[in-house]
Image (spheres, grey):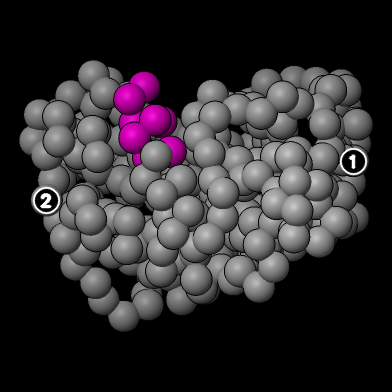
């Protein structure tokens, strides 16, 4: 993986934290930022943090300034999703326990130099993980996708994928990054199960915000590959990581954020 090879001080090992349970939508987001901020004092080692989130709609900061933001937030609550505003860019994205959040946090004395390369490098790694699960996964934005990103990951429907047409493309991974002077956080959300809930809440949110998009670009990986589970994707992601890093594993826990 390019970003792990060209960094000023490339990490060879990652502490692996597989959270036993979500700490809550706001706490999960704040926890990642807290771990990043602790790189200022040397309190965070290179780390991979994986968990299944509570139902959340993470708005971009630009969304908060739109006239329909309050109505969009209320729609989230009505549908059982907690509305939050994340510090990273982009537009609204939805996730829930049928998804997998992968936070990669590293101290870095020159975090800017490869900040753009990371999107492609981690996108390729996660594309490989989904391909290993049996999906036809590809790196790149698809027209009309929600929270559009040049290095997002989509999957392609096959003729045997139930109601999904052979050429249907669905965004299944969105990525975001936050960089400070002493390190970086790269976060990925993989939508594995529950695509209908994602489409429903995003349909209302984007309508209230007045942002055009194609609802058919939203969905979950198991709609394209029936039977795929979050457990299977988690193991595939870890296998992909093990091809580049040594993972220092521990029992499912919550990293100390104090």
Q: Residue furthest bottom?
A: 251
Q: Residue furthest front?
A: 159
Nearer the camera: disc 2 or disc 1 = 2
Residue stretch in magenta: 116-123
Residue at 15% in and 31% down = 7
Q: 70 and 122: which one is in front?
A: 122
Residue 63, can we see it?
A: no
Identify the residue under disc 2: 12
Q: Quadrant of residue 230?
A: bottom right
Count of numbered circles on the image: 2
- CB under 8 Å between callouts 2 and 1? no
Residue 164 sits inside the magenta stretch:
no
Instruction: Report the magenta stretch's main SS.
Output: helix
Q: Is residue 119 left or right of residue 243?
A: right
224 vs 93: above or below = below
How busy is the neighbourhood of tag 2: few (under 14 within 10 Å), some, or many (20 plus)? Answer: few
Q: Is residue 242 left or right of residue 66?
A: left
């Amino acid at each position: 993986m390019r970003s792990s090879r060209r960094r000023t001080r490339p990490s060879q090992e990652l502490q692996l934290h597989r959270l036993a349970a979500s700490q809550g939508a706001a706490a999960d987001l704040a926890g990642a930022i807290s771990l990043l901020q602790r790189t200022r004092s040397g309190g965070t080692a290179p780390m991979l943090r994986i968990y299944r989130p509570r139902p959340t709609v993470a708005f971009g900061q630009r969304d908060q300034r739109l006239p329909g933001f309050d109505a969009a937030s209320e729609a989230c609550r009505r549908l059982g999703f907690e509305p939050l505003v994340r510090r990273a860019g982009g537009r609204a994205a939805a996730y829930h326990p049928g998804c997998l959040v992968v936070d990669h946090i590293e101290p870095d004395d020159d975090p800017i130099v490869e900040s753009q390369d990371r999107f492609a490098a981690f996108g390729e790694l996660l594309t490989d993980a989904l391909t290993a699960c049996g999906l036809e996964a590809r790196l790149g934005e698809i027209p009309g996708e929600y929270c559009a990103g040049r290095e997002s990951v989509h999957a392609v429907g096959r003729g045997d994928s139930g109601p999904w047409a052979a050429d249907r493309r669905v965004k299944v991974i969105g990525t975001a990054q936050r960089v400070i002077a002493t390190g970086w956080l790269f976060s990925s959300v993989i939508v594995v199960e529950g695509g209908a809930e994602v489409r429903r809440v995003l349909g209302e949110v984007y309508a209230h915000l007045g942002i055009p998009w194609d609802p058919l670009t939203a969905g979950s990986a198991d709609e394209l590959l029936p039977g795929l589970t979050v457990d299977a994707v988690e193991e595939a992601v870890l296998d992909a990581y093990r091809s580049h890093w040594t993972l220092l594993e521990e029992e499912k826990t919550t990293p100390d954020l104090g």
